[in-house]
Image: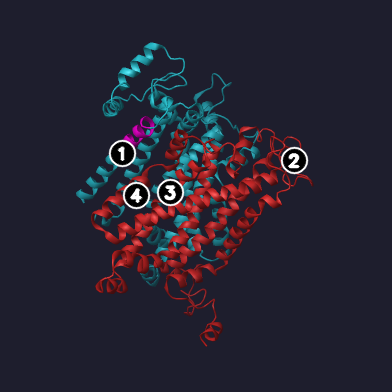
Amino acid sequence: MRGYLWKRSLFAVVTIFVALTVNFVLFRVLPGDAVTRVSRIPNASPALKHALEVEFGLDKSLWEQYVLYLQQLCRGNLGVSFTNRQPVLGNLLEAFGNTLPMVTVGTVIAIAVGVAVGVYAAVRRNTLGDHVSTGVAVAFYAFPTQFLGMMLLILFAGVLPSVGMSDPFAVAMSPSEQFADVVRHMTLPVLTLVLTLYAENALIVRSAMLETLGEDYILTARAKGLSRRRIIWRYALRNAALPTITQVALSLGAVVSGSILVEVIFSWPGIGRALYDAVLQRDYPMLQGGFLVITVTVVVLNYLADLLYFRLDPRVAQ
Amino acid sequence: MSEEITVTTRPDVERRRGVWGALRTAVATPPAIIGLIVIGLFLLVSVFSPLIKPYSTSVPSCEVFEPPSGRHWLGCDDGGVDMLSLVLQGGQVSMFVGFTAAVIAIAIGAIFGVLSGYFGGWVDTVLMRITDYFMVIPQIVLMIVVAAVWGPSLNHVIMVIGFLMWTSTARVVRAQVKSLRERVYVRRAVSIGASHTRIILTHIVPQLGPLLIANTVLAITLAIFNETALAFLGLSDPTAVTWGTIMEHAFERGAISTGAWWAIVPAGLCVAALIVGCYLVGNSIEDGLNPRLRSSYLSTKSWRMRPLVGRGGDAL
């Protein structure tokens, strides 16, 4: 048991370390001065350039640069953004704070809707209700995120705000008004995210439920005369939750890509948008930093899913 | 003689044996047939798209964002280029990207899966750690970084998608190979001194066929998704016409503020239709290979006391 937890922790740490290294290699070893030199900031003062060159040891060998890079990373120094000449870490933390509520709300709703639809479809297997709900889920699974987002933009143009996180012209609002404003701005991005993500969850839950409903203990439960509701929610769903958690944890990557597209479409000032802007501006330090922050977040969330799985099913440790 | 016998048995009831038999049974189910028809239609249209597209995709033939009409069935884009021609041409490129990337991904996944499942031991440990790493890392972000550093080009997009999407195949194939390796016929082959290469190629790989086909078809959906996502973020080849770049251009050049839905909808619906087709086929095969899905002990209607019926459609 201890061994399992140690193994997972070690894996998470190693994964993060590999991501740090990949991050270094991708940007430093490739040819092209603009890519390799973190000090190539447009319009930067000579003092700033010199400071960065000393910090990251740009005239030294690659190996020394790698060590320096790790040292600076421990101090939270990810370099300076090409575009606004502010430290990358500060930019990223601000963007991350904007992303978090939107993605969390969207993911939680998507999981809830997905479980409800999946259980319904599995229980009503091969009936009209199953065909319709599964068909709709497959359709939403098939639409690209950006397509759904743009359709919602056209449909709700003028009804709901479509750009940004808050009304830039509204001043002196009370906290409750401010909250309502953010909620209104969040509606369309969250809706897009839910529509893209719920479908996959529903299909995963449906097939996991179908597998558990075929187990003998369900037959036993029926023979004992347990109520239908109890069999579904207490007996079947509990075991179907295990493969579902694995799958949902692995689809975190889809959450990330979905949220990047959503943020670009709705100009949400989050980390996906920051990544997009960094690509457009060829702002390599921001790109590097964004990659690192998202990767570390996903690895940590996967690690937490592993722990949760272990809590629910201690057999995995064997 | 034997042909007569197979004709008289009812093909819809008979379950053919072995994985290839399961594949044939699965492909004959209604969802799979619909899916195959959709994929076939798209392939056919994309092959002949240079012949059937009504206008040029590089020269304007109508007004900017002209709505759909008799002359231009799907309207026009921001440069006055006929939308129908663009979608036809884009389909060809998008499907090429999707299919090639999927084949690369499945090939890598199959090699990883077979080697680690067959040899086990340290080979398994090393290959699976690598797989775990690629599985956890958010692929689209790595794709963005690599595509941004390499520069925009269709070949780069194909390679980036192909090299990052193989992980789930590797896992599934490994599990399958591990169980195949313990089968009696494989052990017999080992006992009479067959080489590793021979066992893998003649006894194991053929058994993986249907699984790989299902995975490839499902990988195509992901590859096309990722292509449209990368294109939307401006990382695909800006000169190539794909379904992804059509939507990106529409978004970048104000199709939404002018309400020109016809610049977005056709490409989006094509992506969705092709993906539904692939999903139906891939899923039918996967379900056909999974015997556990065939029985359910919970009837679909809420039950009351009634006489026990046989193994019909609404059996227990």
Which residue range is magenta in the image?
A19-29
Please give the letter of the chain rendered in red: B
**The numbered mark 2 sits on a residue in which chain?**
B
Tell me the tag on residue B131: 4
Q: Do the residues bearing badges 2 and 1 touch, measured as CB atoms within 8 Å?
A: no
Mark 2 vs mark 1: same chain? no
Q: Secondary structure at mark 1?
A: helix
- Residue receiving disc 3: B165
Do discs 3 and 2 belong to a common subunit? yes
Q: Which mark is residue B67?
A: 2
Q: Are marks 3 and 1 on the same chain?
A: no
Q: CA distance from mark 3 to mark 2?
A: 39 Å
User: Which amino acid type is shown beneath numbered disc 4?
Assistant: Thr
Image quadrant where residue A148 sits: top right
Q: The residue under label 3 is which amino acid type?
A: Met
Q: State the residue at coordinates (66%, 44%).
A: B86
Residue at 37 percent of width and 38 percent of height: A295
